Amino acid sequence: MSIVEAAETRTVTTPNGTMTTYASPTLGGASASLWRVEMNPHAQGPDHAFVGEVLWTLTAGSATLALDGVTHELAAGDTAVLPADLLRTWTAGPDGFTAMVTTASPGGVWRADDRDTVEVPPWVS
């Protein structure tokens, strides 16, 4: 068992928002990753896919999710179960959004413009 104390969490900020890692293979030795996303109002993430299933629960705000060409509107309290290897793009609503996210390790990601390169984001590693 591991305890990851609040002071040990890892935060990464990008132009679109802030990701805070609570547990991952390199933070607590977890076999899955758990992180919070705080996305800025109207920000749009990159078109990408995870190599494994990813679970998102919006805890505040609203978002539009484009998943494999289909658009979905989500609000606080909604959970999206995203299958592996489907392209997705998140767009925050007018107040942004906060979500809790989890995926099994290693949590690799590929982008629409480079499917052959799989990377593990620092908030997932």
Image: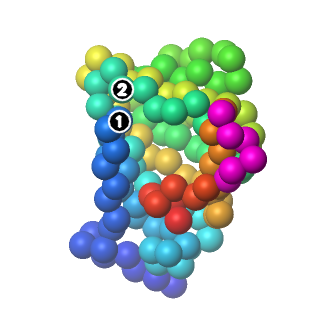
Task: Give the residue drawn at x 40%, y 60%.
Answer: 21
Q: Label 2 belongs to which residue? A: 43
Q: Could you tell me which secondary element the residue under label 2 belongs to?
A: loop
Residue 78 visible in the shown view: no
- Residue 79's image quarter? top right
As helix, strand or loop, the secondary structure at mark 1 comes to loop
For label 1, count other residues whose C-alpha is less than 10 Å away and answer few (under 14), some (14-19) or many (20+): some
Predominant SS of the magenta segment: strand
For the residues labelled 2 and 1, the Cα–Cα distance comes to 5 Å
Residue kind at label 1, given as amino acid type: Asn
Residue to which mark 1 is pinned: 16
Mark 2 vs 1: CB contact within 8 A: yes
Query: Magenta stretch?
Result: 113-118
Q: Residue at x 32, y 59 (%)?
A: 11
Residue closer to the observer: 47 or 69: 47
In the rendered structure, which amino acid carries the disc numbered 2? Ala
